[in-house]
Amino acid sequence: MNNKIITNKILNWYDINKRELPWRKQVSSKKKQYYTLVSEFMLQQTQVATVIPYFKKFIKNIPNLETLANFDEKKLVKFWEGLGYYSRVRNLKKTAQIVINDFNKNIPSNYLELKSLPGIGDYTASAISAIAFNKPFIPLDGNIERVLKRYLYLKKEYQITKENLQEEKKIFGFSPRSSDYAQAIMELGALICKPNNPNCEKCPISEKCISYEKKDFILNKIKKKNKNKYYLLKVFKKNQKYLLIKNTQFNFLKNFDIFPMQEIIKPKKFDKDLNIKLSNMNMNIKIEYDNLDKLVTTPNWIDPKNLKDYTLPTFTKKIVNYLENHK
């Protein structure tokens, strides 16, 4: 099956089967660019179904770049609460400010200029170039990787490196409908070539798919090791409230409210109370109650009964819930 046939088959399937997503609405080109920017930031490491209600609320309250660039950061983070990876929303605001000041209020269409903006890497720059500006890019997200690995039966470690997948994706070819085509291949991965139980009978390119021919749909991944880290977490309690401090010490959850804690390097013995996975970290946490005998910088006392009213990372909420359940 040559590139043009693959392209046409995928696009024809997409035209019939694509989902109605809020960032795919027919709007002006200016709005489409803004919708694409916001949705792509939200979709970094987050599934579509989770993003939809957040996107709708975000756009309703922050309808354009100018509003975003000047929006109060605490309120902005509140709209993002629950999506995690909060550096994304801070970078989104910084990007809006740079676009307003340096690009005459127009999101740049140039890939390298896009990549120079905070929070935008190879994938997001490719996605925005294709979707918002109809440029011939195929962004390599998890969905497209999956279609590619199965279609070409890529199993060996050297075959599934990012570098090789970038090279192999040329099998998809290009289309004058670059915006639709990038979304079409993603959609094929999301709806048909799913991680488990792919629906090959409805796949437009299954007849030449090597995994389908071999009936082997297992996906190999390059193994990433989670780093084991150890932390001593201090709990200060007063009037049934917990003390939190602004995190200026650790790279994770920077500037968010967390419990006072310190990293223990390579302990010989460590009796953890709980374990939390955060990004690529396996966090082993020992909890210790203490008396507040000195002034803590930027203190913030929170009432666990009103947890939902605070703008807190999920990490901190998990600690509070643990403490409340282990009194």
Image (cartoon, rainbow, N blue to C red):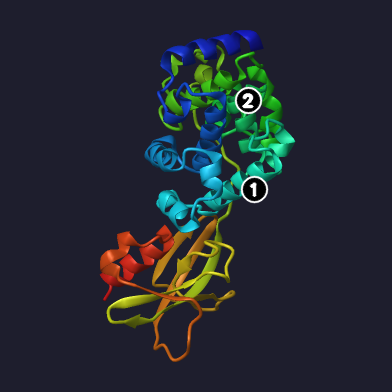
Which quarter of the figure has residue 229?
bottom right
Kindly state the secondary structure of the residue where label 1 is placed: loop
Q: Which residue is mark 1?
A: 118
Number of numbered callouts drawn: 2
- Residue 293 in the image, given as x and y percentages of width and height: 44, 91
Q: Residues within 10 Å of mark 1 (few under 14, many from 20)?
A: some
Residue type at tag 1: Pro
Where the N terminus falls, by quadrant? top right
Q: On the rendered structure, is 7 left or right of 191?
A: right
Q: Earlier in the sequence, mark 2 or mark 1?
A: 1
| Residue placed most toward the observer, 171 or 269 | 171
Which residue matches tag 2? 133
Question: What's under tag 2, amino acid-wise?
Answer: Phe
Left or right placement of residue 38 versus residue 116 in this view: left
Characterize the local packing of mark 2: few (<14), some (14-19) or many (20 or more) Cα atoms within 10 angstroms.
many
In the rendering, at what x and y percent does residue 286 appear? 43, 75
Residue 51, above or below 127: below
Whether residue 245 is visible? yes
Residue at 66 percent of width and 16 percent of height: 173
Asked whether disc 2 touches disc 1, contact meaning CB atoms under 8 Å apart, the reply is no
Q: Quadrant of the C terminus?
A: bottom left
* Secondary structure found at label 2: helix
The residue sitting at 46% across, 32% down in the picture is: 195
Q: Position of residue 277 (x, y in %)?
A: 46, 58
Q: Residue at x 45, y 69 (%)?
A: 258
**Position of residue 73 measured from the top left corner of the image (x, y, whole percent):** 50, 56
Q: CA distance from mark 2 to mark 1?
A: 19 Å
Q: Quadrant of residue 60?
A: top left
* Residue closest to the eye, 191 or 46: 46
Can the viewer see residue 210? no
Of 97 and 37, the residue lying toward us: 97
